Image (tube, rainbow, N blue to C red):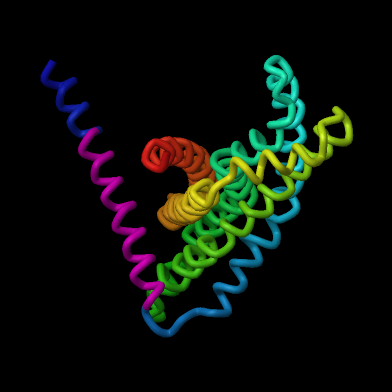
Amino acid sequence: MLSLLGRIGRYATEQIAGMGRMFSFLMSAIFLAFRRPAKIYLIIHHIKTIGVESLSVVALSGFFTGMVMGFQGYYSLRKFNAESWLGSATALGLLRELGPVLSAFMVTGRTGSAMAAELGTMRATEQIDALDSMAINPVKYLVSPRVIASLLAMPLLTAIFDVIGIFGSYVVGVSLLGVSSGSFFAGMENSIVFHDVYSGFVKSLSFGLIITWICCYKGFYAPPMATGVSQATTESVVLSFVLILVWDYFLTSIML
């Protein structure tokens, strides 16, 4: 019995210590982002990799998500003779929930895994140790620009996802199912308020920070071996998905 309790205690202690290391890593990355010299060219490069290179998959997933919401929303609202509210239902669902969450999922799968694999490879090939030996802070050089870039890129990607998703719902609802175009947009105009847009913006910012934080941490401290890179990549994607959903619940419960 004492041995079992000891193992449970050691496991709990290790998990709490790991959470502390992750939080310390995030704080150091944010603090170093405001220290000179600013790595503007690195920030621009990572905006390209996080934002521009993820644009196609975000746009495609947004369009088909909107189309699915158009179909499901229409057949659900038709039971109550409320097809005219299709635009409102789609816009609210995308702006408040699906837009930020699905955009974050796409960026995690497209770019977050690449971050973890890249930093894990740099750890395995001792490039991070080489930066240390040259008196270059590896967190400031490798992590801080990615954090800033994700905070800039994620809200823009989410906005694109929302717009294309609403267009996909419009194509299905108006062009295929015969919903009035005027009622589609009138419902959005009457139902959407600034708080809905603001809540989606806050979620996209926080999700961008979570993705960069988790993926960079897992890659930065990956075991220096070939299997360590794959392990860090898998753990970063899975943990990012879980934390995005958990944090989305807390933000939704707070911002209602």
Locate residue 163 relative to residue 170 in the image: left or right.
Answer: left
* For residue 67, above or below residue 236: above
From the viewer's side, name the closer residue of 27 and 250: 250
Number of numbered discs: 0
Q: Nearer the viewer, residue 166 or 68?
A: 166
Q: Position of residue 42 (x, y in %)?
A: 56, 75
> In the rendered structure, does residue 47 fall within the stretch colored magenta?
no
On-image quarter of the C terminus? top left
Residue farthest left in this picture: 2
Residue 171: horizontal and vertical position, in percent?
A: 83, 39
Does residue 211 appear anywhere in the picture?
A: no
Using the rendered image of the protein, determine whether residue 85 is visible from the camera's viewpoint. yes
Residue that sits furthest to the bottom in the current view: 37
The answer to which of 30 and 101 lies nearer the viewer is 101
Q: Residue at x 64, y 60 (%)?
A: 51
Give the side of residue 37 with respect to residue 160, left or right. left
Tell me residue 241's x, y (percent). 51, 39
Which residue is drawn at the image coordinates 75% and 37% (left, top)? 183
**Location of residue 192 in the rendering, given as x and y in whole percent from the top left corner:** 59, 44
In this rendering, the answer to whether 98 lies above or below 149 is above
Q: Which residue: 68% across, 17% down?
A: 80
Magenta-tinted stretch? 12-34
Q: Main secondary structure of the magenta part?
A: helix
Residue drawn at x 65%, y 37% is 88
Examine the rendered structure and indicate whether residue 36 appears above or below residue 148. Answer: below
Query: Which quadrant, please, contains the N terminus?
Result: top left
- Residue 1 vs residue 166, the one in the foreground: 166
